[in-house]
Image (tube, rainbow, N blue to C red):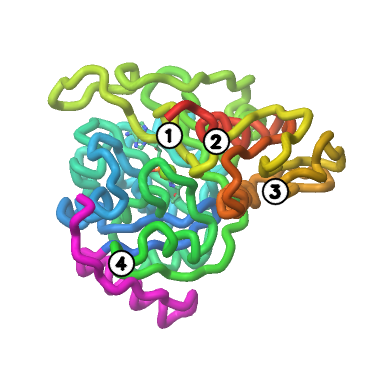
Amino acid sequence: MNDRPPIPTRRLAGDAAGVAEAARLLRDGACVAFPTETVYGLGADATDPAAVAGIFAAKTRPRLNPLIAHLPARAAAQAQGAFDVHALRLAEAFWPGPLTLVVPASAGTTVCDLARAGLPSVALRVPGSGLARDLLGIVGRPVAGPSANRSGRVSPTRAGHVLADLDGRIAAVLDGGDTSVGIESTVIACLGGPPRLLRPGGITRAAIGAVLGFAFDGQELGGQELGRPKDAEAARPLGPGLLASHYAPRARLRLDAAAIEAGEAALLFGPAEPLGLDAARAVVNLSVGGDLAEAAARLFGALRDLDASGAAMIAVAPIPSSGLGEAILDRLARAAAPR
Ligand code: TXA
Ligand code: MG
């Protein structure tokens, strides 16, 4: 997978001409990275297994992981899956936006088996980014899109991040500037029974509970409970979001740090200054004012910047677990997990 000859990766402007060219490339079966409001996705025609295989090759991602299919509007998404009452409510409330719904695939789904990893379910999302929806509308087919980073690395929130990981491996990146949410979508499975939270993300647990009308305490689940793959392979991982080590910078991470050791990079939140900050090799504060939305938007870029300082360890100050803090802490815990 690492021995593909490099291809020139084009940087397309986020205007009508760039969108049209990105759509043409996608319809031709190429891989094109595109901005959403969460992170940049690595897009390919979800109806074409050869195109989807290109995603796995570019990312060096294990093929077992199912991908999200992106659609330009709710009606197009609902044609791909069976929505129960919970899924309908959530789609109405949060689409377009940073929510992914895992639902049973409809009989007529055009999302290919490879994109669904052979599962009877399908992950669907209508992104909040207008540029993304314009692109999807012109493509006219569902677009598979994992985050546009090398597998296991930090998700990209600007075109430069995409190129740092994938230059020479994909046809183009559509440049829409910095993403606004900065952390991936919340993934919820509605497969009969109560909805379950598979990945915390850009929409908070509280917001979801408010729409569903009950306290939403769904747990993150392992693979088998979510519907069996057709080939009955048992305990394979559902996706990289469910692997322990993910979103990893090169440096190690130390969470909940009250003090900074000399030479460490420091990732701060809020106005408090930890002990030893003067001896830090590099410092980024995610939000001096303690705003979790601002912190989420800056998280992945901050990890990339602190990594670039060359520090062997990133010390992370305490971050509250409320609201978007749940998703931020989830990503930090994965980045800190043993590899
Ligand atoms: O914000 C986002 O969701 C970004 C942008 C590009 O849309 N995409 C993204 O994709 O984060 P990815 O592939 O990195 O994460 C997709 C998550 C994985 O955790 C995967 O396991 C889960 O969705 N997923 C996809 N299809 C699934 C299915 N059928 N059942 C359960 N989980 C599924
Ligand atoms: Mg990812």
User: Which label sits in the foreground, 2 or 3?
Assistant: 3
The residue where tag 1 is placed is 241
Q: Using the image, tell me which numbered label, if any, was put on residue 168.
A: 4
- Which comes sooner in the sequence, label 2 or label 3? 2
Q: Please say if 170 is above or below 195.
A: below
Tell me which amino acid carries mark 4: Gly
Which residues are drawn in magenta?
1-30
The label nearer to you, 4 versus 3, is: 3
Quadrant of ligand 2: it is top left
What residue do we see at 80% from left, 42% from top?
277
Give, as a three-letter code, the residue at label 1. Answer: Gly
Q: Using the rendered image of the protein, determine whether residue 106 is visible from the camera's viewpoint.
A: no
Nearer the N terminus, badge 1 or badge 3? 1
- Mark 1 surroundings within 10 Å by alpha-carbon count, few (fewer than 14), some (14 through 19), many (20 or more): many
Q: Three-letter amino acid code at disc 2?
A: Arg
**Residue at image coords 26%, 58%:** 45
Residue 288 location in percent, x, y?
82, 47
Residue that carries the numbered disc 2 in the rendered image = 252
Q: Residue at x 20, y 46 (%)?
A: 112
Q: Which residue is mark 3?
A: 281
Q: Regarding mark 4 in the picture, which secondary structure is present there?
A: loop
Say which label, 4 or 1, has the lower sequence index.
4
